[in-house]
Each structure stands twice: as structure tokens, then as C-alpha cells.
Amino acid sequence: MKVALWGNTSKPLFWELLPKVAAWMEEKGQELYLTTHIHKRLEDASSYTYSIIEKADDFSDVDFVLAMGGDGTILSAARGVEHRGTPIFGVHLGGLGFLAEGTVENIYTRLEVIVASRYSTFPRVLVEATIEGDSGVTVTALNDLVIDAGEGFRLMKCSLFSEGNLITSYSADGLIIATPTGSTAYNLAAGGPIVAPWLSLFTITPICPHSLSSRPIVLPTDSDLTVTFPEDEPGARLTVDGQLEYPVSAGGKVVVRKADYEVNMITFEDRDYFQTLRTKMGWGQHNGGGN
């Protein structure tokens, strides 16, 4: 198999694992590909056998992407793969996370299963946003889109429409538009619901709304949503998966819809989503629970 490695190079544990993973790949006869980001930071490239992912389309030529880091690393890997459909296997290097299917302790066991083709892929819905106005930029997110007033503590006012029909207007610190995958991220912290990742839904959650009647709402993905702003609003900011930021100019609006492609995440027979939730959320630890 051809395996592309994507990693969080700011973590010392990544650099500790890299030579071990590279040696395992070579021993098992697998072809290792490194991103240019990793390649440029290698202290001794001569000790590794690998090819380089030089452009995004090179991901089409590999069998899967091994993303080593946290949820943020997996999110950025999904953005790198984009529409190409290459499966992603996430390995968590510590901290709270929901996306990774592997850990430092079981990485080689999981890789053995993948190399033997005894795995399945889980397609994840993405949300797409187009900023209508000066920029006209279109972006996609695996977790969420966040619209707020930008730097400072200014209250944001906006209105949410579905296919031209007004749903409601908000006065809040911001608005989170989350996929089912992202329901356990910022959406959860802001009081939004957890949504099973195999559903095709968007959750709209206001951040610190200035009204007791403002509540999260769950909407289907088969309708376009539009976020507009009052004429006197100076503009806003769109944040993608907590990693990329884009300005929304005064008078602009944000059109949101389901992306026309999905990201394939590698999963395994012994993985249970609800077990992951119980473990990460600490559910049932003090109430006698059940087996």
C-alpha cells in the first residue's frame, strides 16, 4: 500500500514516533509518502525511505492518509484530501478528541488490519459556505463554521434563512453551524446537542445569545441556509474548523449548504461510537450505570 503521513509537527511525540512508523512501513513493504511540511523539517532525511506529496492531487495516488496528532490534525488532513476520497486513519497523540480511530498504544495493530484490508470507511458530511460580497470565497468544513463579529467584544446581529424563509434573528457573540462530526466540538461546549455522525443534519447554535428564547436548532442538509446581517453591521468573520478565518464585508452574506462530497474516515469492527462518547464524556461513572 501507499501511505501518506500527515502530522502535527509541533508535538515532540510525533517526531518520536516518526522513525518507528517509517521503519514499520519499510519492514512491511509499504510505500511511505511524507507531506512537504514534514519533509522540510526532517533533521536527517537520509535515514528514511519515502516519497513526497508535492501537490494536493498526489493524495489521489495513495491508499490512505495516516494523520498523527489530535482532532485538529485530522481536520487539516481532511482539508488536504478534500474531494479526492482518500481514506484517513487518525491516530491520537493525547488530549480529548473524538475523531481518531487509533492511539499510540494500538497504532501498529490498527495498521496491520488496514494493510490486510480488514477495515471499513465511514463517510462524513461536510458543510460548505460561500461568502457573497467582495471576497466570493467558498470553503468547506468537517467540524463547523463559526460566524462572529471578529476581534473585540462586539455583539453580532444576524438573521438565519432557509430557502429564503426567515427562521429567526440573533443577537449573540456568534453562531456555530456544525456538522454531526462537529457536534462534539465547539457546538457541544456552547450547549448544542450531540448528533450521531451517520446522520445528515446541521446544528445551528448561538454563542452566548442575548435572549433566553434563543436555542440550538437542528436542520436538514437538503436546503440552503443563508446568514444575513443588518445594513448597519460593519462586517463579520467566518472561521472554518477553528483553523482558517475569512472576513465577511459589510453588506455581505453567508450561504451554507451540504458539500457535494464527503470525507472517508477509516474505522474498525470493534469501534463503538457510543462507547467513545461514554469514555470521553465520563457518562455513567457515578450512577451505577449498567454493563
Image (cartoon, grey):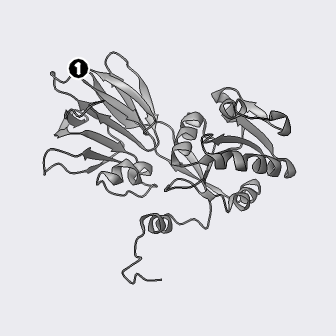
Q: Is residue 138 left or right of residue 262?
A: left
- Tell me if I can see residue 88 in this picture: no
Marks counted in the figure total 1
Q: Quadrant of residue 108?
A: bottom right
Compared across the picture, whether 69 is left or right of 127 comes to right
Inspect this view and state whether residue 203 appears: yes
Q: Residue at x 17, y 48 (%)?
A: 214
Work out whether residue 122 or residue 212 is closer to the camera in this orientation and state it: 212
Which residue lies at the image location 28% right of the left edge and 47% below the top edge? Answer: 205
Q: Is residue 19 above or below residue 268?
A: above
* Left or right of residue 67, residue 116 in this image: right
Residue at the disc numbered 1: 251
Task: Tell me where residue 42 appears, x and y as whole percent.
Answer: 74, 35
Q: Where is 258 relative to 111, above or below?
A: above
Give the x, y percent position of residue 134: 33, 15
In the image, residue 96 above or below residue 30 = below
**Callout 1, which amino acid?**
Gly
Q: Residues within 10 Å of mark 1 (few under 14, many from 20)?
A: some
Q: Could you say which is closer to the camera, residue 108 or residue 203? A: 108
Place of residue 149 in the rendered image (x, y in percent of width and height, measured from the top left): 26, 31
Q: Is residue 190 left or right of residue 76?
A: left
Which secondary structure lies at badge 1? loop
Q: Position of residue 158 (x, y in %)?
A: 20, 33
| Residue at image point 44% right, 30% down | 139
Residue sitting farthest toward the top:
134
Residue at 44% from the left image edge and 44% from the top image edge? 143
